[in-house]
Amino acid sequence: AQSVTQLDSHVSVSEGTPVLLRCNYSSSYSPSLFWYVQHPNKGLQLLLKYTSAATLVKGINGFEAEFKKSETSFHLTKPSAHMSDAAEYFCVVSLSGNTPLVFGKGTRLSVIA
Amino acid sequence: GAGVSQTPSNKVTEKGKYVELRCDPISGHTALYWYRQSLGQGPEFLIYFQGTGAADDSGLPNDRFFAVRPEGSVSTLKIQRTERGDSAVYLCASTYGGGRTGELFFGEGSRLTVL
């Protein structure tokens, strides 16, 4: 079975400081991994994805994530938080094109001015 | 171009009633997914269509839930004899192919409240 664990339900950072949202996955095979963001009253939007190419993946809005197989992790980072980054972030795993995406429970990011 | 459209955006119903939720995917997308998101949780998979057929309905919680996509475009999620536990945001997403390497495009969801 495949699953993801988001280690923090809520992260709070000051504007201009680094962001780290942690995600660990469980999969018997080489997974595809994603981060999605959900702003209030908006649809989920893809931030970035890993599909067995480069292990450091760059996404939109300055976010990036590194796939570490030895640690089964796919943490999301950003060097400098902006107020507009405040949202819910979901780590997502998929085994194949015919299996559905499995979402983590989400991490709510708050950015303090 | 238009994104994934879901109607209604909000639905309040009474326990035991029948509900239909509609999803209009992005034009040309062959794959369509339904997810359910309860308060404080991540989206949970319900059913996946490839074209007109349900390729995977393993996430439907019981036989009160049913979904159709008769012409391979618009989909309707149907819930019979609604229960209070069915209250959630129902999300629809579409994409060109399988979900593994393709990006899923989500609608804003239909919030269902069962009183």
Image (tube, coloured by chain):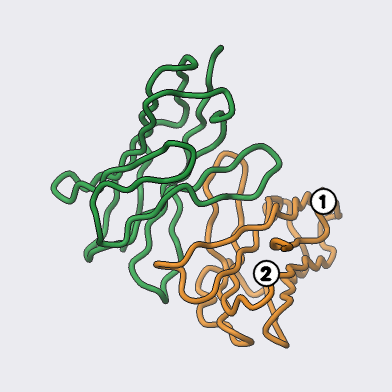
Chain colours: A green, B orange
Which residue appears at 85% of the width and 51% of the height? B12
**In the picture, which quadrant includes the N terminus of chain A?**
bottom left
Residue furthest to the top in view is: A113
- The chain that hosts pointer 1 is B
Q: Which residue is mark 1?
A: B10
Q: Dot 2: within a 10 Å radius of its alpha carbon, few (fewer than 14), some, or many (20 or more) residues?
A: many
**Of B44 and A54, which appears nearest the observer?**
A54
Q: Amino acid at mark 1?
A: Asn
Residue B115 vertical position relative to residue B61 in the rendered view, above or below: above
Residue A50 vertical position relative to residue A20 in the rendered view, above or below: below
Displayed quadrant of residue A74: top left
Query: x, y (%) of residue B63?
Result: 64, 75
Q: Amino acid at mark 2?
A: Ile
**Horizontal side, residue B108 vs residue A24: left or right:** right
Q: Earlier in the sequence, mark 2 or mark 1?
A: 1
- The chain that hosts pointer 2 is B
Which residue appears at 75% of the width and 62% of the height? B5
Quick one: SS at disc 2?
Answer: loop
Query: x, y (%) of residue A2?
Result: 32, 60
Which residue appears at 40% of the width and 67% of the height? B101
Displayed quadrant of residue B34: bottom right
Query: x, y (%) of residue A112?
Result: 54, 14
Residue B26's disc is 2
Quick one: SS at disc 1?
Answer: strand
Q: Dot 1: within a 10 Å radius of its alpha carbon, few (fewer than 14), some, or many (20 or more) residues?
A: few
Q: CA distance from mark 2 to mark 1?
A: 21 Å
Residue B81 vertical position relative to residue A87 in the rendered view, above or below: below
